[in-house]
Image (tube, helix red, strand yellow):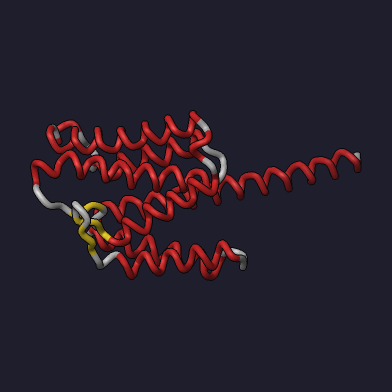
Amino acid sequence: MEEFYYYWSMWFLWVLTTFILEKNRIRLFASAFILLNIILSMYQLRFILFFNAAYLLFYTGAFWLNGYLSIYKSVRRLFLHLAMVFAYGFLFLFALYDPVWFILKPEWLIIMLFVIMTAAFEKSFASRLALFVLGMCQGELLYSLIIRKLYGDIVVGGFSWLSMCSAGIVLIFGMSQCERLVHQIHQIWKRLNKGATKMS
């Protein structure tokens, strides 16, 4: 069932980037990234832990995007990123040791928390995406390193993580498009009001 969310989310994003977004280099890069991510999701690599290859692609893509946007030059963004990493680890460890406290699945709580945090502190879609994915990647790595002593060899960035990450990306994309739509409606409304005041 975990694969279901991941594949549907990624195919949805691929259809959006391929057929709906305007033609430019970013669209080509995003479409290729999504397809490569879907292909690599079936493979695992072993360094010290087992890593899903799609997780590593997300990780390198998030590092590249963070470097491109110079996110770590801002102390506020650095603290936000660290808060996301530790929140991920804390919430999953808390759910592991005391699951009675959770009404919702911890995976959905993490997605909602991270989407709200990135939306509250970042304005652009690229910054939100970069912080969200990197926070998810490093949070998963931290959590896996901690529970490795309990469970032995586990896969870092398995399908449950891929499902969470892709669902969060869809939410961030949807939120950015809604904000863009509201802004466009506001601009049209201002133009209509200016025209009405000139006529009167």
Q: Residue at x 18, y 31 (%)?
A: 101
Residue 47 lies, with reference to residue 121, above or below; the image says below
Q: Is residue 179 left or right of residue 154?
A: right
Please name whichever residue, 67 or 171, is drawn nearer the observer in this view of the structure: 67
The quarter in which the C terminus is drawn is: top right
Instruction: Please report the residue visible at 23 percent of the width from the left and 63 percent of the height from the top.
Output: 44
Q: Is residue 95 above or below residue 137?
A: above
Between 160 and 62, the residue placed more toward the observer is 62
Q: Position of residue 52 (x, y in %)?
A: 26, 59
Q: How many numbered circles are shown?
A: 0
Which residue appears at 43% of the width and 35% of the height? 117
Where is the N terminus found, in terms of image quarters?
Answer: bottom left
The picture places residue 3, in percent across and down from the top left corner, at 26, 62
| Residue 92 lies in quadrant | top left
Q: In the drawing, does residue 43 fall left or right of residue 117?
A: left
Looking at the image, residue 38 lies above or below residue 130 = below
Residue 111, given in percent of the width and then of the height, sits at 35, 43
Q: Is residue 171 left or right of residue 156?
A: right
At 33% from the left and 64% from the top, the residue drawn is: 7
Pinpoint residue 186: horizontal percent, then vertical percent: 69, 43
